[in-house]
Amino acid sequence: MASSAPPNPARTSLEDKILTIRTPNEETEDGRIRNREAATKIRDAWIYKQIRARQDEFTQYRSARIFMGTWNVNAKGKEESLDEFLLKDFGPNQETPPDIVAVGFQEMVDLNAVNVTVETKSQQRSQFWIERIKTTLNNPKYTHSDPSRGYTFLTQRYLVGLLVCVFVRNPHKSRIKYVHSDSVGVGVMGMLGNKGGVSLRLQFYDSTICIICAHLAAHRENVAGRNADFWNVYQKTSFDIGEEAIREVIRSGSLSQWATGSSSVGIPDHDIVFWLGDLNYRVDESMPTERVLELSEKGDLDELRSLDQLNNERAKGTCFVGFSEGVLNFRPTYKYQPGTDVYEQRPDKKLRAPAWCDRVLWMAQEPKHVQQLTYARSESPNISDHKPVYSTLNITIKDVVPAKREKVYDQVMNLLDKFENQTLPMVGLDRISLDFGLIRYEETVTLPIQVTNTGKVVAQFRLVPKLDENTLCKPWMKVSPTYGMLIPGEQPATINFSITIDNNTANLLNSGREVLDDILILRLENGRDYYITIKARYARSCFGMSVDELVLYSDPIRNVPLDPIKRAEKFDPNPTSALCVPKELWRIVDAIYERGLQEKDLFLMPGLPNEVKHIRECLDTGAALGKYRTHSLAEAMLSFLSNLSTPIVPPSLFPTLEIDSQNIQSFARKFLEELPPIHYNVFVYVMSFFREALLYKEQNKLVATRLARICVDTMVRGDDQVQRRTGMQLIMLHLLETNTI
């Protein structure tokens, strides 16, 4: 059965990677094709899969203590003591210090436009907090000048207001290696760093640890935005740790990623993952703000916990799949009147419901290897509108015994030798033809094929390119896994074939340069080839088309055939009957206008992904637009303009000279005169709409400069030269602020 849902990204990443082969295939005397390098790598992958399953037999387990702290400092930074926050779990006489200390900060700088785009103060503020932590941990009052009780700064990663830093107790310095970092911005336009995550990973003894500090989407009602931010950070975070590190951690049973040709690992490829930060999940809106305040002030937490958005979303499987968290036995940590222990209720401030925004979660390959000892908030420092949150956990880490590991290795090899060097392999496929049916724009559909070893020997299989081609399949298809190995009697392997219609594929389909048909070759090493046929049909969308073609049709674009002959039979090709602007653009602009241009943060706040998807379907099919949020309609409009196959503004119209107040009028007039007719209509239509929106700037918070930037981002492509794009932005600003149009 077809499925459009993505695979669970929390699973191990071994089989999601493409097997990289550097040596050519060989043809045997009887015409069979084989590749010794591929066979060796697939064999090694299976061997290490078995070793991982038996890692307890060659691993000594040690107990270690790790401290996780998170604090949204609200751009504050006084010299207030961090002792209660960082050292409370050290014990009365510092007899239980953690072996690793990891601290994450959010909003260490103001999240204004300058800091978000330039990061002018981030390095300075990150160094300030690192020094504060270092001084606190190594205070002679606690270390008694004993180096073994002190801490060494290991590494850090910052992104605008985010910072994560790690310190290790001095006796363990020599057992840490393969330290790497990454950052993912998911804020403005889905990529800037006012929201996102910073991550560190390391190998501690023979266990791999990943630490993520995140700041997710705000606002009580924006649960979907937070979930989306989580998955973006989770899926995009990657560490290139090098081939040597890959080999070592796999041989220790810590990573199922061997023979893939990739030296990068993601979040779920680690033994233990810690995720902390201002995750911004609130108490569900079904409870009034006043009631949340009342219960929070009393410390009556049971009812509040039952409505905590994060735990409810985790229970539904929409975020933090596979993660664990301790019980919230402390009062909500946000929002406080800075400098006090009083929830913010001043008359001149917006009244917000208290919430557990600040959290610490973890995920482990072996859940029993993490035990939470404390999970609490700190009452000091109190300079921010958030209270710091910390957790101390006991973790079980691996210390491999090489001699025992080699004994297990020999046993696995002896088992494998029983089945090798016998007769030719044989496999059975439950089907060799896949019909994906109708697929929509930006949709992924997956169909499986089961491979069963029907012979008496080991069967190694892999997808290979067709003759004179370099890729396994067309760009719109993904196959996972691309290789595998089955011993006789082993459970069948499943190969998932997925088709995704992205903007580039839609352009090719609309222009007739691509069809959703392909033939893939599954090669059985030392055996035969199997030919798998792929076919699907594209549910045509206005996204990814040109305005010149869209204006030709008054019917919904879904009803317009892709085949040019059928299209000519059904529709009048006479351009004199063309519309002035695409009906899809008119419908969505009309819907935004009807719902009111006074919506706060119009064109600045993203919409809900599911609503944007439904809006696109309505535009394609002609169905009535439902009661969607104005922000979702606005995002759909910008996405429509951004994804046109031909931009509204051709690259040839970029200004070639520097724009100034003396020449901008003539440049703007020439620019309008040289726009192609349909592009001119669309451009004037969009700019007139934006000018109308600016009439309500007091309510919607729009400014002309921001709209000018949006115009360039959505209607202009093809030139990344800063001066030329700046000139184009000035022309847009001029047209928005004057009566030139």
Image (spheres, rainbow, N blue to C red):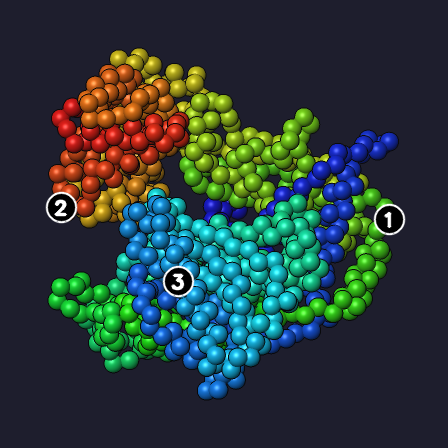
* Count of marks overlaid on the render: 3
Query: Considering only vertical position in the picture, is 656 above or below 725?
Result: above
Q: Which mark is residue 698?
A: 2
Secondary structure at badge 3 equals helix
| Nearest the eye: 512 or 323 | 323
Q: Residue under circle 1? A: 421
Discs 1, 2 touching: Cβ within 8 Å: no
Residue, disc 3: 128
Tell me if label 3 and label 2 are in contact, CB under 8 Å: no
- The earlier-in-sequence mark between 1 and 2 is 1
- What is the three-letter code of the residue carrying label 1? Asn
From the viewer's perspective, tell me whether residue 355 is left or right of residue 58: left
Q: Amino acid at mark 3?
A: Phe
Which amino acid, by three-letter code, is at mark 2?
Glu
> Which residue shows up at 22% across the image and 70% down it?
337
**Quarter of the figure with residue 306:** bottom left
Camera-nearest residue between 1 and 46: 46
Residue 445 % position (x, y): 49, 42
Q: Residue at x 43, y 18 (%)?
A: 564
Q: For the residues carrying marks 1 and 2, which lies nearer the camera in this image? A: 2
N-terminal of the two: label 3 or label 1?
Answer: 3
Give how far across and how far down residue 620 sits, in percent: 34, 33
Mark 1 surroundings: few (<14), some (14-19) or many (≥20) residues within 10 A = few
The x, y position of residue 16, in whole percent, is 59, 48
